[in-house]
Amino acid sequence: MSITIQARGISAGIGSGALLVSSEPISFLSGVDPDSGIVIESGHPLEGQSIAGTVLAFPFGKGSTVGSYVIYALRRNNVAPSAIINTEAEPIIAVGAILAEIPMVDRPDTPIEDMKDGMSASIDGSSGTITINDE
């Protein structure tokens, strides 16, 4: 069975993959290795996990504006998430997603805390929809 969640489109395109959900914000500058896509921020709930190819869901970004370029570097290195879901987009993540052509949405009707790791998800950044398959 699949469910569709309405959100606000930020960066156009369609991306799909397994959900990777964090209850904590992510800093891409010094928090994610741009060469491997591994979360390296000490103590972060996703520390040691790869974001490559995932539908990455987290509340919002934090840190320096250089984080936008780290997101772009992730794409160039083929280790970027396939899509991003934020509770509330802020400029660092939105600009990075647009530069890297990563589909992105925010303000989902269902809180990201209710989304489960590993579920298959598809994001349409143009229409602002999230489709989750719970099978």
Image: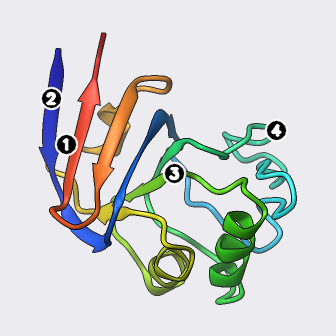
**Precedes in sequence: disc 3 or disc 1:** 3
Label 4: state its secondary structure.
Answer: loop
Asked if residue 46 is positioned above or below residue 132 in the image, the reply reads below
Task: Find residue 122 and report its image quarter.
Answer: top left
Q: Amino acid at mark 4?
A: Gly
Tell me the number on the disc at residue 110.
1
**Precedes in sequence: disc 4 or disc 2:** 2
Residue tagged by mark 2?
Answer: 3
Q: Are marks 2 and 1 in contact (CB under 8 Å)?
A: yes
Q: Which residue lies at the image location 33% right of the left edge and 68% below the top edge?
A: 88
Structural distance between the alpha carbons of marks 4 and 3:
18 Å
Label 2: state its secondary structure.
Answer: strand
**Precedes in sequence: disc 1 or disc 4:** 4
Label 1: state its secondary structure.
Answer: loop
Residue tagged by mark 3?
Answer: 82
Q: Amino acid at mark 1?
A: Thr
Residue tagged by mark 4?
Answer: 48
Work out which quarter of the rendered image holds the N terminus and state it: top left
Work out which quarter of the rendered image holds the C terminus and state it: top left
Structural distance between the alpha carbons of marks 3 and 2:
19 Å
Q: Which color mode does the image show?
A: rainbow
**Precedes in sequence: disc 3 or disc 2:** 2
Structural distance between the alpha carbons of marks 1 and 4:
27 Å
